Image (cartoon, rainbow, N blue to C red):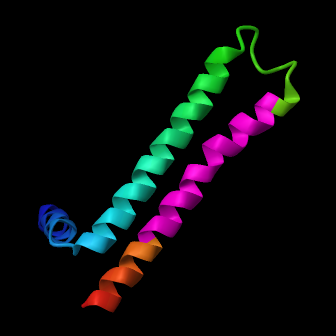
Amino acid sequence: MVASAKRLLDRIVSMQQLPWDIWMGSLILSCVLVFCAFLLMLEEPSGLSGKYDTYRCVWELVRLPQLVLLLGILASVCAEDYIL
């Protein structure tokens, strides 16, 4: 288990610049989307029960980062294979 984790970390550290930028950009965008969802939930003091539009917006902002990360990882893997 430790050996496979070390191999994975070595592989991540040895990435080329373009795939690294793609991966970090998707990670930053995902964090921003989750933070925006958190701020929208804090904005409503009475909860989201009466505001269906706000609830749907928060729901999508929570689900969208998963897709962004998946596409970012796939794009960085494709870029890494194309460069090598």
Residue with the most extreme top position: 45
Quadrant of the rendered image containing residue 82: bottom left
Q: Is residue 51 above or below residue 53?
A: above
- Residue 48 lies within the magenta run: no
| 61 to the left or right of 8 | right
- Residue 68 lies within the magenta run: yes
Residue 49, position as x, y percentages in the image? 83, 20
Quadrant for the N terminus, please. Answer: bottom left
Residue 22, position as x, y percentages in the image? 38, 66
Q: Residue at x 13, y 61 (%)?
A: 2
Residue range of the region highlighted in magenta in the rendering: 54-73
Q: Residue at x 18, y 69 (%)?
A: 4
- The foreground one among 70 and 7 is 70
So how many labels did they put on this image? 0
- The foreground one among 69 and 29 is 29
Quadrant for the C terminus, please. Answer: bottom left
| 65 to the left or right of 50 | left
Residue 21, position as x, y percentages in the image? 32, 64
Q: Residue at x 52, y 68 (%)?
A: 71
Specify the principal SS of the magenta part. helix
Q: Residue at x 41, y 48 (%)?
A: 28
Quadrant of the rendered image containing residue 73: bottom left
| 74 to the left or right of 79 | right
Q: Is residue 10 above or below residue 35?
A: below
Q: Is residue 12 above or below residue 84?
A: above
- The foreground one among 20 and 10 is 20
Residue 19, position as x, y percentages in the image? 32, 72
